[in-house]
Amino acid sequence: MSYKEQLADKRRELRELRKAIPDTFAGFVEMEKAASAEAALDHKQKEYVALGIGIAIRCDSCILSHVSALVRLGASREEIADVCGMAIQMGGGPGLMYAAKALAAYDEFTAEG
Protein backbone atom coordinates (compact mmCIF):
# COMPACT_ATOMS: atom_id res chain seq x y z
CA MET A 1 0.00 0.00 0.00
CA SER A 2 1.39 3.43 -0.93
CA TYR A 3 1.95 6.20 1.60
CA LYS A 4 -0.88 8.18 0.00
CA GLU A 5 -3.22 5.21 0.41
CA GLN A 6 -2.11 4.71 4.01
CA LEU A 7 -2.79 8.36 4.79
CA ALA A 8 -6.21 8.21 3.11
CA ASP A 9 -7.06 5.07 5.14
CA LYS A 10 -6.01 6.76 8.39
CA ARG A 11 -8.13 9.80 7.54
CA ARG A 12 -11.15 7.51 6.96
CA GLU A 13 -10.49 5.82 10.31
CA LEU A 14 -10.27 9.20 12.02
CA ARG A 15 -13.60 10.30 10.52
CA GLU A 16 -15.20 7.19 12.05
CA LEU A 17 -13.51 7.87 15.40
CA ARG A 18 -14.81 11.46 15.30
CA LYS A 19 -18.36 10.11 14.83
CA ALA A 20 -17.92 7.70 17.76
CA ILE A 21 -16.47 10.22 20.22
CA PRO A 22 -17.34 13.69 18.90
CA ASP A 23 -16.69 15.63 22.10
CA THR A 24 -13.31 14.05 22.77
CA PHE A 25 -12.31 14.42 19.14
CA ALA A 26 -13.39 18.08 19.11
CA GLY A 27 -11.34 18.68 22.25
CA PHE A 28 -8.27 17.22 20.59
CA VAL A 29 -8.83 19.35 17.48
CA GLU A 30 -9.05 22.49 19.64
CA MET A 31 -5.80 21.56 21.42
CA GLU A 32 -4.14 20.96 18.04
CA LYS A 33 -5.29 24.36 16.77
CA ALA A 34 -3.95 26.09 19.88
CA ALA A 35 -0.62 24.26 19.74
CA SER A 36 -0.23 24.93 16.00
CA ALA A 37 -1.12 28.62 16.15
CA GLU A 38 1.64 30.94 15.09
CA ALA A 39 3.52 32.39 18.03
CA ALA A 40 7.30 32.29 18.56
CA LEU A 41 7.36 29.58 15.87
CA ASP A 42 5.37 29.72 12.67
CA HIS A 43 3.11 26.86 11.55
CA LYS A 44 5.73 25.33 9.24
CA GLN A 45 8.34 25.30 12.00
CA LYS A 46 5.87 23.60 14.31
CA GLU A 47 5.19 20.96 11.66
CA TYR A 48 8.95 20.28 11.51
CA VAL A 49 8.93 19.73 15.27
CA ALA A 50 5.92 17.43 14.99
CA LEU A 51 7.58 15.43 12.21
CA GLY A 52 10.76 15.03 14.26
CA ILE A 53 8.76 13.78 17.22
CA GLY A 54 6.71 11.46 15.00
CA ILE A 55 9.91 9.92 13.66
CA ALA A 56 11.52 9.63 17.10
CA ILE A 57 8.47 7.93 18.65
CA ARG A 58 7.96 5.74 15.56
CA CYS A 59 4.42 6.86 14.71
CA ASP A 60 3.74 5.86 11.10
CA SER A 61 0.54 7.87 10.78
CA CYS A 62 2.14 10.92 12.41
CA ILE A 63 4.96 10.83 9.88
CA LEU A 64 2.56 10.66 6.94
CA SER A 65 0.30 13.39 8.33
CA HIS A 66 3.11 15.84 9.07
CA VAL A 67 5.04 15.17 5.84
CA SER A 68 1.81 15.77 3.92
CA ALA A 69 1.25 19.03 5.82
CA LEU A 70 4.83 20.12 5.18
CA VAL A 71 4.45 19.43 1.46
CA ARG A 72 1.38 21.72 1.47
CA LEU A 73 3.43 24.35 3.35
CA GLY A 74 6.20 24.24 0.73
CA ALA A 75 8.87 22.27 2.58
CA SER A 76 11.80 21.15 0.47
CA ARG A 77 13.27 17.67 0.39
CA GLU A 78 16.44 19.09 1.95
CA GLU A 79 14.46 20.53 4.86
CA ILE A 80 12.69 17.21 5.44
CA ALA A 81 16.06 15.44 5.32
CA ASP A 82 17.47 17.89 7.88
CA VAL A 83 14.57 17.17 10.24
CA CYS A 84 15.20 13.46 9.67
CA GLY A 85 18.81 13.96 10.73
CA MET A 86 17.78 15.57 14.02
CA ALA A 87 15.19 12.86 14.63
CA ILE A 88 17.84 10.18 14.07
CA GLN A 89 20.08 11.88 16.59
CA MET A 90 17.21 11.99 19.10
CA GLY A 91 15.72 8.58 18.29
CA GLY A 92 18.82 6.45 17.72
CA GLY A 93 18.82 3.48 15.34
CA PRO A 94 15.05 3.03 15.12
CA GLY A 95 14.84 6.73 14.26
CA LEU A 96 17.06 6.02 11.27
CA MET A 97 14.50 3.58 9.87
CA TYR A 98 11.54 5.91 10.42
CA ALA A 99 13.47 8.86 8.99
CA ALA A 100 13.94 6.86 5.78
CA LYS A 101 10.15 6.35 5.72
CA ALA A 102 9.51 10.08 6.16
CA LEU A 103 11.79 10.96 3.26
CA ALA A 104 10.24 8.27 1.04
CA ALA A 105 6.78 9.61 1.91
CA TYR A 106 7.91 13.11 0.92
CA ASP A 107 9.15 11.78 -2.41
CA GLU A 108 5.83 10.06 -3.06
CA PHE A 109 3.72 13.05 -2.03
CA THR A 110 5.69 15.35 -4.35
CA ALA A 111 5.86 12.95 -7.30
CA GLU A 112 3.78 13.83 -10.29
CA GLY A 113 0.62 11.83 -10.79
Image: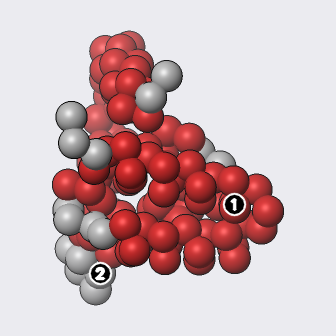
Question: Of the residues tagged 1 and 2, which is closer to the observer?
Answer: 1
Name the amino acid, label 1.
Gly
Res 34 seen here: no
Near mark 2 (Cα within 10 A), the count class, few <14, some 14-19 or many ≥20, is few
Q: Give coordinates of residue 3: x percent, y percent.
A: 44, 34
Q: Give coordinates of residue 113: x percent, y percent.
A: 21, 34
Q: Would you identify the image quadrant in which residue 14 lies?
A: top left
Q: Would you identify the image quadrant in which residue 29 lies?
A: top left
Q: Give coordinates of residue 79: x percent, y percent.
A: 38, 74
Residue located farthest toward the bottom when viewing the structure as drawn: 40
Res 39 seen here: yes
Q: Would you identify the image quadrant in which residue 87 lies?
A: bottom right
Q: Taking 67 as reference, is 45 above or below it?
A: below
Instruction: Classify mark 1: helix, strand or loop.
Output: helix
Q: Which mark is residue 41?
A: 2
Q: Earlier in the sequence, mark 1 or mark 2?
A: 2
